[in-house]
Image: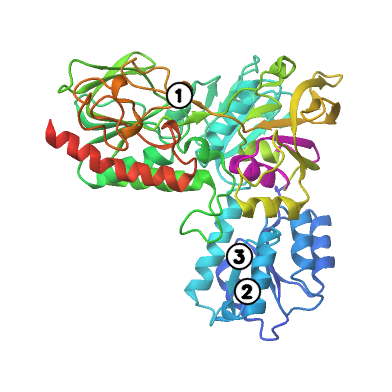
Amino acid sequence: MPVLSPPAPVIAVVDPDPAERVARALRPRYSSHYDVVSLDTAADSLAALHADGRSVALVLASADAPEHPDEGVFSHATRLFPEARRALLIEWGAWADADTAARVLRLMSDLLIDFYVVRPADPRDEDFHHAVTEYLRDWRATTPERRGFTIIGSDITPRTHLLSAQLARSGLAVTRLDPTSPPAVELLGRAGWSYRGAPVVQTADGSLLDDPDDRAIAHATGLSTGLPGSPVDVAIVGAGPSGLAAAVYAASEGLSALVIERGSVGGQAGSSSLIRNYLGFPRGVAGAELARRAYQQAWAFGARFAHAREATGLARADEDAAFTLTVGPGDEHVVAGSVVLATGIAYRRLSVPALRPFVGTSVFYGASSVEARAQRGRAVVVVGGGNSAGQAALHLARYAASVALLVRGPSLAASMSSYLIAQLDALGVEIVRDSRVVGAQPDDEGRLAAIEVEHVTDAVRELRPCHALFVTIGARPHTEWLPDSVLRDRWGYLVTGSSAPDEDLPDPWRGGEPPGSLETSVPGLFAVGDTRRSSLKRVASAVGEGSVVISAVHAHLAAR
């Protein structure tokens, strides 16, 4: 009996235009892989598609369609197909109309649409098709239908979750199977394998890896882990926004650059589901997508990367000598004329003993897209009051039955961008102020079922249903591996420029010119991004510092 292919995903068009300009422009290009459907009664039609088990990739609705679809269609699509992309159809130039502009901005603020799309002037309108293709690409990135990796592992094994997040942040499709599920048993049986308690990963080419470490995953995804055998002009430690920007500018200006990254490219920003206020992305951009583009740009200019490697030591014979970096695993060495520290920060662990058994399985530090999709129908709590917490809560709200944002202070205004606060309100995310987590309770199967919350103003405690807890608070800079000659504040942040007290500076700066604005207490050693004291904890700021620091690197190398 032949195996039936699943029905094609739907591009839904709600537009009263009798000429059907939009549908006629879409069908010739997309009907081979998508079902282009013109809907009349949009709400009923979307419900019918959902009842039939269809997937909807894109909803395009006109502002002047019947039944006010700018309210009904998009709200129904958001509820029934949370991963579908949604856009308001407008005529060319209508963005200048005050009412149309207000409608677009309101729908975006309420998270009912991603942006607008201008109706095609003719079926070959490439601006229209470029917009449609970008929407479809974004939708495709959220589906498990792409060729990718399969992880066979238990949900109560932290390594299963870590591997899922690592692969997802690399832009790969990840399917997670319980070891007892029929597909997992069949997959392992075909290979003559058995599940022995640790995750098994099937790569994109079909090969199996038994409990792979980070370097094995890097090799399987085509990433380099080796170190150069000759000195480089600049070694950049960390591939977050600041490190990637430094790599792009260093390599584009002719410097030999090596980037050392122990985790995933993108740093903390790479886990952001949508960064709406980054320059040049009117619809916003996922942190992982922004990181991938920057990585490819740096690679195209000739920067080298050592993935799944960690800088563990830094030495220098004298102030005129090159730096020697010790890199693990294996304690190999890299010689560099200058070093840029872009090591970023990690979220601070909650000092709540009752949470420890759940860390990595239902208590997560940060939030990945793959974990968000696993929260369908569950109660979720996010701890934190910054932009990362707001972005995580918004993304989780697309899947979870309920999302609460727990903040220790009385207000979000001082720590979170106003557009995020407005969107949290529009989605009905509960804000629990003046509160902290003090305990946890498991269910009968040992999984997280509830957290105990204390209100700091009156010490009253309450139990709150919680199946997954995402923590995005505090910051711990990764600087403990550096020698004592590198000046840090009491929290471990790197001190740069004139903020370094004169008496704490080593020769040759003591009593003379202070270090450059991004230079540490060690000449030729620079710090950028979140790891630097007094830096503005925003992606754009980190990118700016990474770009600017290369001029100082040039000056240092020229003076040697």
Earlier-in-chain disc, 3 versus 2? 2
Q: Which residues are magenta?
A: 374-397
Quadrant of res 120: bottom right
Residue wearing tag 2: 101
Does the stretch in magenta take in 395? yes
- The residue lying furthest to the bottom in this view is 18
Earlier-in-chain disc, 2 versus 1? 2
> CA gap, disc 3 to disc 2?
11 Å
> CA gap, disc 2 to disc 1?
45 Å
> Disc 1 vs disc 3: which is toward the camera?
1
**Residue 102, how many percent across, how many down?**
66, 72
Crowding near pointer 2: few (<14 within 10 Å), some, many (20+)?
some
Question: Which of the numbered marks, if any, corresponds to residue 478?
Answer: 1
Q: Foreground: 475 or 63?
A: 475
> CA gap, disc 1 to disc 3?
38 Å
Does the rendering let one see residue 299? no
